[in-house]
Amino acid sequence: MQGLKKEWEIEPKTRECTIEDFKGAQPRWCPGCGDHAVLNAVQRLARDKRLLPEKTVVVSGIGCASRFPHYMRTYGFHGLHGRAFPVACGVRSRRPDLHVFVVTGDGDCCAIGAGHWIHAIRYNMDLTVLLLDNNIYGLTKNQTSPTTRMGERSNTHPLGAYLPPLNPLTVALGVSNASFVAQTVDWSPPHLYNTIRAAYEHAGTSFVRVLQRCPHFTSHVFEKALNDLSHVLLMQHERGIALELDVARKFPNQVAHNPDNLDEARSIASREDVYPIGLFYRNENAVRYDEITSRGLSKTQAEKLAAVQAALERFAI
Amino acid sequence: MHPTTKTRMKDSARPAERVEEHIIEIVSDSGEGAQTCGQMFADLCVRNGNGVWTVEIIPAEIEPPRRSRAGASGNRIRLGSKSVTNAGDFADIVVALNEQVLYSRIDAGALRPGTLVLVDRCGGEHPDENVARHYREAIRHFRAKGFIVIEVPIEEECLKRTDEVRKGKNMWVLGMLCAIYALDETSVQERIATRFRKKGNDFVRRNMDLFEAGREWALENIEYRFHVPAQNITRPTVAMNGNQALALGIMAAGIEMCSMYPITPATSASHFLASAFAETGGFVHQAEDEIAAVGFAIGCSYAGKTAVTITSGPGFALKTEFLGLAVMAEVPIVVVVVQRGGPSTGLPTKIEQGDLLAALYSSPGDSPKIVMAPATVEECFHFMVTARKLAEQFRGPVIVLSDANLATGQQPFPKPQVSQAWLAPPLDQSPWDPELPPFAWDTKTGLSRRPIPGQRGGEYVLTGLSHDEQSHVAYESAINERGMKMRSRKLAVLEGSLQPPKIHGDPEGDLLVVGWGSTLGAVEEAVDRLRADGLLVSSIHLRFLSPLEPGLREIFSRFQKVMTVEVNYSDDLGEPYVNAESRRYSQLAQLLRAHTLVDVDCWSRIPGNPIPPGEIERQLRNRMHVIRLEARCKV
């Protein structure tokens, strides 16, 4: 047809999908597991942001949370324990057209995968990272995780965990080139959804820790906060996580926090008397490594061939 | 009048001795530039039309203490009038910038009586009496060993032209060697100018001066002249080392991502790649560790861009869990292992062929992978193109086993005629038939096409768990067994498409030697020497180790005895507790014994250096002797 480009498509680029289009296998998590709420939020986000299933990749490691990709009808990568980050970075490295989610747990991310976690934050590729933190190893049946509270009993520490827990927030906020660090809870669906949405909209590695219950092993851990929202500290700011007024009103304990303020973010993140939720830190100007790794994508076959010949010529005699 | 003409007139040396080949070593403390000197000399010989093989002599540290016996750094260059396939036996000339570094070369068996040793005499004039005494002792010792020692005032002469003598002696030596081998000095001057262009005009001029001074001094003071006839270079030729060849092969294969973590001796491949890869639109990712490097490559491959990761033994050990995933989930990926001495950190800069069985078996469970080993620098280039294609066609990892000998050895070879067909095809983003599962295994071959993210209708969740055609997690026995079968079948299919190995020598005889990897030239040279004496020895050299090349049993049946020659560990019969049952065989021998049920023998050594042809020759003669005795007993 005259006037039309070769790659012209009949189908509009922004196909609209429903939540059903993003539903994969029937989740096999325990009833009452916080993972269900996160899955619902992500499927809703995919619909609302008009993601295309074929352009979306969910990468995970091993653990309860890492079953996540199976329950999405998108491309998924359920790989090795602790290694979701390198895989996700590799997926993203030469495919800037793909939306990449990383779903990980407290063992997967903060123990066996801790090295990759820190470097992934520093690479700041465009990934939406969800750390589903239930303070315990669930899949392998009740072993202490790095975020288990000191004194909590488990199968590996029947006398109680010996050490104070690792704080994933202060770790993430301590990594240079970090660009987005937030925390939310599975029992406030609006805050959970809005946080994941802000994370998705951020261009760079957005790290979201979701506090959630494991109904089997740690149902008691967040019990106080569940019953009494004054144990939660809601961070509010116009540049933070937007929250409907009627939802925000339910949190008696609030603080104004500007996510540009890294020092204050670290200070709030260190608090042990409350669970702070909201956006700790955002930096839109952090270096994006995926913009560097994807250079040269437009080279044609002919250009590549000529370049190989030129490179060989450097060794000619 | 041209200055060089003037000096040539002074040349009153005896006429050049014509030799078919010569071995030259240049050794110094680290940081004195002996390697640069050796590389440039090799480069000149290649340009001259000589066959060349070089070996780097490298200490493990960047700059070990000066004048230490184990600190030798430099190059061995074997040049010939025809193509040269290995580093040879004994050096004909050794240039040493101090006498102490020579000891390690003597220990390595690199010299023999009659070797011409040109040693810097500055040690003898050192103000520290201990140094001077050590020098005198060394020279006495070398002469007693039968070397022809010439004390050369290298430092003294250089000091007349530069204060930075540590950085200048190598060019002086290059000049000296050019005089001895009557190489054309104008092309050297061009090379100096190119090589040091970035360091500025003064630097280039100073090096030119030193080169010229060394040449003039040698013309006047050294009577030895050698002429290694060269052949006219008739077709386009390139010269490089194995790691550079790997890097160029990666580019020619159309691979866009090399994900690595620094490790010796693999890293230099990434160095070259990092400098040139952008030209083909590629990128070198230096990961936070070896595991991340392979994970990143697998992620990139999963997303449709087959990637490569380059490592050495200890790094490979860390990657094995991920490689098991690549096997299980059928992700194409190319893994280059530039082998070094093991176990553990072992000999980081030295050659060994110790990772063969690890390459085949080190992932959890049964994880069949393709393993291939280039035998020459040229093959390092071409195997990368093959490896990417095999990885994609057979949907899994392909491991390419190089080694420290190939990595740093320079060799000329015909310039590859690069083709667009070698490049990875553009990313397929056409819609996927939703009826076609992500593992639509052809039940006969186990082969299947893979959906790539972006292909609508192909959405699936890759998993390392046991899975069915749909990639759905499934623990049922029948599904597990079928998956295993399909993955294993692919290797049988590949075996069926390979040719039997070519036999070097007669197709039957008394002894068949089987080798793999960088020992090709040395093994064949040893075999040729025996054959020249009428002994019925042949050899084959395997490029595919998994699957093994076809026809081995049949070939083995035509020889009285079959043995491997390898650079890895094996017990020798006759050692305490070692008997026919307890003996641990070298790695290829183990494979061949299991594969063919033939009583394959082995001879292997782990000297950290390439095994010289002369040593292999001696071993083969011993075996031949035994075979003959046995035959006589039978009669």
Image (spheres, coloured by chain):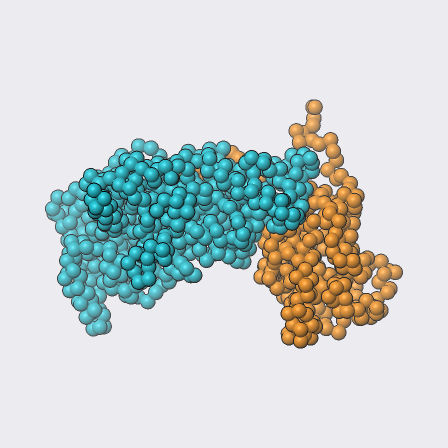
Q: Position of residue B527 (x, y in %)?
A: 26, 42
Quick one: quadrant of the N terminus of chain B? top left
Asked if residue A156 lies left or right of residue A312, the reply is right
Asked if residue A48 lies left or right of residue B463, the reply is right
Q: What is the drawing colour of chain B?
A: cyan
Q: Position of residue B68 (x, y in %)?
A: 29, 66
The correct choice, above or below, for A17 with respect to A233 in the image is above
The front one of B213 and B387 is: B387
Asked if residue B150 lies left or right of residue A32, the reply is left
Quick one: quadrant of the C terminus of chain B? top left
Q: What is the drawing colour of chain A?
A: orange
The front one of A37 and A245 is: A37
Q: Residue at 46% across / 50% down in the picture? A: B359
Q: Residue at 52% across / 53% down in the picture? A: B363
The correct choice, above or below, for B410 with respect to A32 in the image is above
The correct choice, above or below, for B89 with respect to B143 in the image is above
Residue B142, visible in the rendered structure: yes
For the view shown, which residue lies furthest in the front direction? B635
Q: Position of residue B245 (x, y in %)?
A: 41, 44
Q: Position of residue B256 (x, y in %)?
A: 53, 43
The front one of B308 and A37 is: A37
Q: Quadrant of residue A1?
A: top right
For the view shown, which residue lies furthest in the top direction? A2
The front one of A139 and B123 is: A139
* Label total for image: 0
Residue B5, visible in the rendered structure: no
Q: Residue at 49% across / 39% down in the picture? A: B492
Q: Residue at 64% across / 41% down in the picture? A: B469
